[in-house]
Image (spheres, coloured by chain):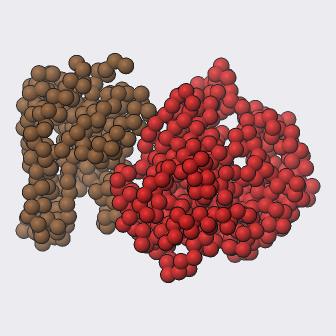
Chain colours: A brown, B red
């Protein structure tokens, strides 16, 4: 089979949203590179997508904390894209319980390393390739948790906030090369991260989030909340005065 | 988490987890073993087969990947949460169909093996378990065993149709059947009474690929057993009219109990019968529309209201079917338990599982809204089934007693012997297992 004109490198591909995104992108005609740590699991997802869609699907080893390995991975992905357009979907993340983090500072460092440093390093390594390619899409999963520091989730939130600002800059840089950078901020999504948590409402399916991500990427959108009404919710939350906000248990 | 069967008669509270990877599944079994576990797939068994009050439930929905496919043989390997809908979507355009299909495409393959489901082609192709090559079974001790008719025939026979009580299926290998198209030509004919119905079934069961009957369970007197017989064959590609498939609709909320009463159901049945012209009719429809008519209405179980409903399905052997069905229909007609969508079909042969439902004969399935007297009525139907040498389908059942189970399923002791061997500490258990005395352990759930 000849290479598709588009190839998506999906990072953190074992997660429910990433899996759904990979499936949706393949159904849309793209080849897929699945990158993550659980190779046995990724092999199964690769088989599934290949059988369902007939697209080429390859598996690559990726660990967000292995910063030295990022360049090797990106180079391998560029080769696998085989002259076609390489696109990135960043879905890796680590959301420990805030109370666990408060007991163990090392866990804070780990969350920051995966969610922020890992993502930034990877994108810094990839940026020149995108500039040379002069086209392509980058989608990164941010979080509504990055919109305001909250009692219940502030370390994870701060890493996602940092990532969000980083992506703004990267967007401006790559805009000059015709590459789009889309920051997606999912609200509650029905994933392993949220399964069984109390107090969730209007939970979105990973499939619907994945479809929204793909659509936004193809349209070159800058930022989007999924489901869309989280824009409204977060606007309210962002505008609560800090004097009051610090007293809230959210 | 609160879960119910499709009939929504009982609500079971249990701790649930939903693994997304095989590794997580294995870890979940080890972690939850002491509390007792059952797998929960599509939630389409009607009673308490996938419920485990006070214990643990492992949801298999996210283990839904197709792991391999051989286009030369139709052999496919899937995770347990893959649904019939997945199979139809992916493989029907490539000329393959699931070897047996229950009435809903939202059922999972794990569930299909556990209930050894049958479809509208049972006479010709048997039940789902007949096409299974092997099952990778995660056992109570945390090990995985590849179970096949060759490798461990007894464990295989206890897993096919075993209602999930031998372990959790990690992967299932089965053969699909060639499908000669994406659409079928459905021939519908009015059947004026039970004798005509049975005679027509006898005539077509050896030649038709698909056959199913809708029976008016409220018709009495000379109309007793009237209905519509549908037979279907794959349509030649040239006969297929292009057109967008109809969008699924949903029942948005529980209908109040009074909506379904003997008069509305009678009117519905009259309409449903007369819709087919006296001379019969023939239509070409998408295969999935024929196989899964009710999937067009999401949450159709809500029409029975908050209290839910029972579904009764039994099979009676050929020899006693005529008299037995007459007796069942008389009882149902007398009680006027509002029931529509009653289905009459033929089954061709015994399944491979110790607790497989099929046997050569006629199967009758119908819904009963849960209201006063429904349980007593179902017990009567149960007794008639036993008297006629038949059995009740465990995937539908919510009421059977251990004694009735023994009378219907002669291989029950073989089944229990396998459980004692592979799961001595009763790690896998369910509300159904406790109700039917398949698992003895006390202190779990509400009723031990």
Q: Residue furthest front?
A: B151
On the image, which quarter does residue B405 sit in? bottom right
**B47, A167: nearer the viewer:** B47
Residue drawn at x 42%, y 58% as measured from the top left: B143
Residue A138: image x %, image y %? 19, 34
B45 relative to B321 in the view: left or right: left
Quick check: B32 above or below A220?
below
Residue drawn at x 31%, y 20% as measured from the top left: A3
Quick check: B157 above or below A37?
below
B185 relative to B253 in the view: left or right: right
B416 relative to B64 in the view: left or right: right
B370 relative to A46 in the view: left or right: right
Residue drawn at x 79%, y 70% as measured from the top left: B383
Residue B181: image x %, image y %? 62, 27
Q: In which quadrant will I find the N terminus of chain B? A: bottom left
Q: In which quadrant will I find the C terminus of chain B? A: bottom right
Residue B66: image x %, image y %? 45, 40
Label count reads 0
Residue B75: image x %, image y %? 54, 35
From this viewpoint, is residue B439 visible?
yes
From this viewpoint, is residue B266 visible?
no
On the image, which quarter does residue B18 sit in? bottom left
Q: Residue furthest bottom?
A: B443
Residue drawn at x 63%, y 63% as measured from the top left: B415
On the image, which quarter does residue B305 sit in? bottom right
């Amino acid at each position: 089979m000849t290479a598709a004109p588009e190839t998506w490198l999906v990072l953190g591909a074992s997660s429910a949203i990433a899996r759904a995104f990979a499936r949706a992108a393949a159904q849309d005609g793209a080849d897929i590179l699945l990158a993550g740590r659980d190779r046995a699991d990724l092999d199964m997802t690769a088989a599934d997508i290949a059988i369902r869609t007939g697209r080429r699907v390859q598996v690559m080893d990726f660990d967000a904390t292995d910063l030295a390995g990022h360049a090797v991975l990106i180079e391998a992905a560029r080769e696998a894209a085989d002259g076609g357009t390489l696109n990135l979907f960043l879905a890796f993340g680590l959301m420990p319980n805030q109370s666990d983090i408060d007991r163990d500072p090392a866990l804070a460092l780990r969350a920051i390393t995966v969610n922020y440093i890992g993502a930034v390093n990877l994108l810094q390594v990839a940026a020149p390739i995108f500039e040379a390619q002069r086209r392509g899409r980058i989608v990164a999963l941010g979080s509504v948790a990055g919109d305001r520091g909250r009692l219940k989730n502030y370390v994870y939130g701060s890493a996602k906030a940092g990532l969000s600002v980083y992506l703004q800059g990267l967007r401006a840089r790559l805009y000059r090369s015709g590459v789009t950078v889309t920051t997606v901020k999912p609200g509650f999504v029905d994933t392993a991260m949220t399964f069984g948590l109390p107090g969730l409402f209007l939970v979105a399916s990973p499939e619907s989030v994945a479809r929204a991500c793909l659509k936004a990427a193809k349209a070159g959108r800058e930022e989007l909340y999924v489901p869309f009404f989280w824009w409204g919710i977060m606007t309210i939350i962002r505008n609560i005065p800090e004097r009051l906000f610090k007293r809230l248990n959210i | 988490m609160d879960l119910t069967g499709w009939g929504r008669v009982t609500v079971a509270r249990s701790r649930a987890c939903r693994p997304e990877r095989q590794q997580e599944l294995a870890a979940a079994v080890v972690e939850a073993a002491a509390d007792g576990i059952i797998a929960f797939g599509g939630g389409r068994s009607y009673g308490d087969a996938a419920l485990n009050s006070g214990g643990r439930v492992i949801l298999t929905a996210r283990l839904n990947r197709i792991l391999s496919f051989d286009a030369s043989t139709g052999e496919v390997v899937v995770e347990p949460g893959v649904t019939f809908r997945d199979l139809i979507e992916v493989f029907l355009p490539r000329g393959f169909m699931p070897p047996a299909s229950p009435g809903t495409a939202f059922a999972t393959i794990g569930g299909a093996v556990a209930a050894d489901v049958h479809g509208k082609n049972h006479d010709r192709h048997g039940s789902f378990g007949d096409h299974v090559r092997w099952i990778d079974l995660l056992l109570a001790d945390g090990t995985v065993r590849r179970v096949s008719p060759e490798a461990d025939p007894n464990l295989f026979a206890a897993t096919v149709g075993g209602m999930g009580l031998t372990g959790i299926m990690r992967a299932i290998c089965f053969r699909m059947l060639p499908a000669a198209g994406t659409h079928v030509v459905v021939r519908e004919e009015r059947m004026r009474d039970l004798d005509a119905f049975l005679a027509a079934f006898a005539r077509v069961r050896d030649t038709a690929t698909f056959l199913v009957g809708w029976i008016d369970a409220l018709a009495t007197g000379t109309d007793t057993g009237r209905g519509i017989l549908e037979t279907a064959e794959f349509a030649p590609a040239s006969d297929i009219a292009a057109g967008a498939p109809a969008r699924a609709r949903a029942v948005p909320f529980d209908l109040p109990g009074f909506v379904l009463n003997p008069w509305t159901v009678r009117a519905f049945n009259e309409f449903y019968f007369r819709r087919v012209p006296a001379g019969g009719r023939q239509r070409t429809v998408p295969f999935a529309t024929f196989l899964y008519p009710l999937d067009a209405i999401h949450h159709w179980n809500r029409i029975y209201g908050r209290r839910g409903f029972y579904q009764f399905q039994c099979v009676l052997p050929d020899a006693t079917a005529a008299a037995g069905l007459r007796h069942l229909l008389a009882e149902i007609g007398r009680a006027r338990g509002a029931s529509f969508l009653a289905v009459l079909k033929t089954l061709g042969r015994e399944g491979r599982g110790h607790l497989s439902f099929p046997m050569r004969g006629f199967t009758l399935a119908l819904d009963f809204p849960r209201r006063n007297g429904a349980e007593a009525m179902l017990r009567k139907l149960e007794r008639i089934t036993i008297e006629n040498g038949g059995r009740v389908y465990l995937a539908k059942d919510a009421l059977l007693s251990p004694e009735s189970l023994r009378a219907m399923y002669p291989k029950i002791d073989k089944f229990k012997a396998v459980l004692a061997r592979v799961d001595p500490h009763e790690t896998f258990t369910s509300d159904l297992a406790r109700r039917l005395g398949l698992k003895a352990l006390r202190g779990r759930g509400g009723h031990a």
